[in-house]
């Protein structure tokens, strides 16, 4: 009887990729207001359509040209219920930039400025931001349940948030700052990029996994990219199934038998890497993500492997299937960093030494055999989100691992992590 591979498909898979389109309504979510106001201006990176603003008793949305109208200051700006920042005085030129929201000089490109730029650009509904950023209504709706302040988040937390809500076009930090610098027009025409704001590579979210130990992680063929980042997948069993929702099995520690997982020697690493690179050597359709051309081979990374192995082992022993760690004592990264919740992909790869990343992605699978990962790869390539992670030309390195526990639900748990630095 054919094994069933249950897939967990992350709709945001990879928050840190530049291709893809977030979709959504192209119409404006703001409304023009022609009344007389003491304060009127334009929210810009490129003009932002659909951001919420509040001032006094007024709550409204920026119009297609980014305009807003208030009787007085301060004015607070949000997307959903994520606060971008606020101004207490309208700038002389009436433009409100990410620097103004971060309360810094306009020639400064610091971390808070970059987070605002990444956030707004990643929420654009079609990736065409030359004239305006039109915020995707579907993503705005999901952010209404988020009550947080963007400038208090880490960059990693921001990418993971974008991944969680399903942003498919997560812009990396360098690209976001380059766009901001280019499209501020005369506001920044001659402004130098300060040392603090150098367009340096900074970690973003796109999970990757190491070898050794069966399938594991949210979904038998689960793709998580950073995204900026990456999406949420689904779960494995037998008879390939896919789902756009995340399924998590309640953590339950099970007896761990003597592992039957082969020792991770150079030959096995090469076999896992070969199967990934063989897929990348030919162009292929990845469902709604479209056609991916044949692309360059990846190199093996031990740190990504360590992160993947940790996660596969955690899933197998804790009897869970998710990109989020179990939060039990088997979740090594969570045990070191925090105890209240399970580890994230970004936390795992950084904890295992894969730092200074610019993008990462993760696929997970469960319930397949261990025959050199052939079944797991077949399931991933048949799933659009996972396929996209495997074919992403931006990725440069990978690690892949499997862990076996005969007393767990799916027995074999696979993790595949991808990265770019």
Image: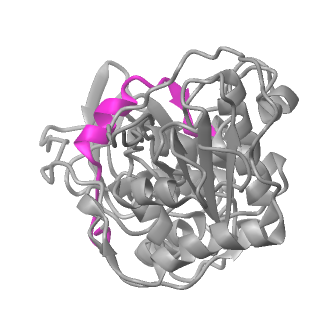
Up/down of 329 relative to 351, above or below? above
* Magenta span includes 147: yes
Give how far across and how far down residue 273 sits, in percent. Answer: 64, 71
Determine if residue 74 is in view. Answer: no
Report x, y in % for residue 13: 45, 51
Who's the residue at 50% across and 53% down the image? Answer: 376
283 vs 345: above or below: below
Q: Is residue 369 magenta?
A: no
At 71% across and 73% down in the image, what residue appears? 270
Q: Quadrant of the C terminus?
A: bottom right
Q: Nearer the viewer, residue 317 or 384?
A: 317
Which span of residues is magenta-colored? 128-151
Compare residues 267 and 124 and report the one nearer the observer: 267
- Figure quadrant of the N terminus: top left
Q: Left or right of 112: which side holds 26?
A: left
Q: Relative to 105, does residue 366 appear above or below in the rendering?
A: above
Residue 311 horizontal/vertical position (percent)? 70, 40
Q: Is residue 235 visible?
A: yes
Nearer the observer, 76 or 163: 163
């Amino acid at each position: 009887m054919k094994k069933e591979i249950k897939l967990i498909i992350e709709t945001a898979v990879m928050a840190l990729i530049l291709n893809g389109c977030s979709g959504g309504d192209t119409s404006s979510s703001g409304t023009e207001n022609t009344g007389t106001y003491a304060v009127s201006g334009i929210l810009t990176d490129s003009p932002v359509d659909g951001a919420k603003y509040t001032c006094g008793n007024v709550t409204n949305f920026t119009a297609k040209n980014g305009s807003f109208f208030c009787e007085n200051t301060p004015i607070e700006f949000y997307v959903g219920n994520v606060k971008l920042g606020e101004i207490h005085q309208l700038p002389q030129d009436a433009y409100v930039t990410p620097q103004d929201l971060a309360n810094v000089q306009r020639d400064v490109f610091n971390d808070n400025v970059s987070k605002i730029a990444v956030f707004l650009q990643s929420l654009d509904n079609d990736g065409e931001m030359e004239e305006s950023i039109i915020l995707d209504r579907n993503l705005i709706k999901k952010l209404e349940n988020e009550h947080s302040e963007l400038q208090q988040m880490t960059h990693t937390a921001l990418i993971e948030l974008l991944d969680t809500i399903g942003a498919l076009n997560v812009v990396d930090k360098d690209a976001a700052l380059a766009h901001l610098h280019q499209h501020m027009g005369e506001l920044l025409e001659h402004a130098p990029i300060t040392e603090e704001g150098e367009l340096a590579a900074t970690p973003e979210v796109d999970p990757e996994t190491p070898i050794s130990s069966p399938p594991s992680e949210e979904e038998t063929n689960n793709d998580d990219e950073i995204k900026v980042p990456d999406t949420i997948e689904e779960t494995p069993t037998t008879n390939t199934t896919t789902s756009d929702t995340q399924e998590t099995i309640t953590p339950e520690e099970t007896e761990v038998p003597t592992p039957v997982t082969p020792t991770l020697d150079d030959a096995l690493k090469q076999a896992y890497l070969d199967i990934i690179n063989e897929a990348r050597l030919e162009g292929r359709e990845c469902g709604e993500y479209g056609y991916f051309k044949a692309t360059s081979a990846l190199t093996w990374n031990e740190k990504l492997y360590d992160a993947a192995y940790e996660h596969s082992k955690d899933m197998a022993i804790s009897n869970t299937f998710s990109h989020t760690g179990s939060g039990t004592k088997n979740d090594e990264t969570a045990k070191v960093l925090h105890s209240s919740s399970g580890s994230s992909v970004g936390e795992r790869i950084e904890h295992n030494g894969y730092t200074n990343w610019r993008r990462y992605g993760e696929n997970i699978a469960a319930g397949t055999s261990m025959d050199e990962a052939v079944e797991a790869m077949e399931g991933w390539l048949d799933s659009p989100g996972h396929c996209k992670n495997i074919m992403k030309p931006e990725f440069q390195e990978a690690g892949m691992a499997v862990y076996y526990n005969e007393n767990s639900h799916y027995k074999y748990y696979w993790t595949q992590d991808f990265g770019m630095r």
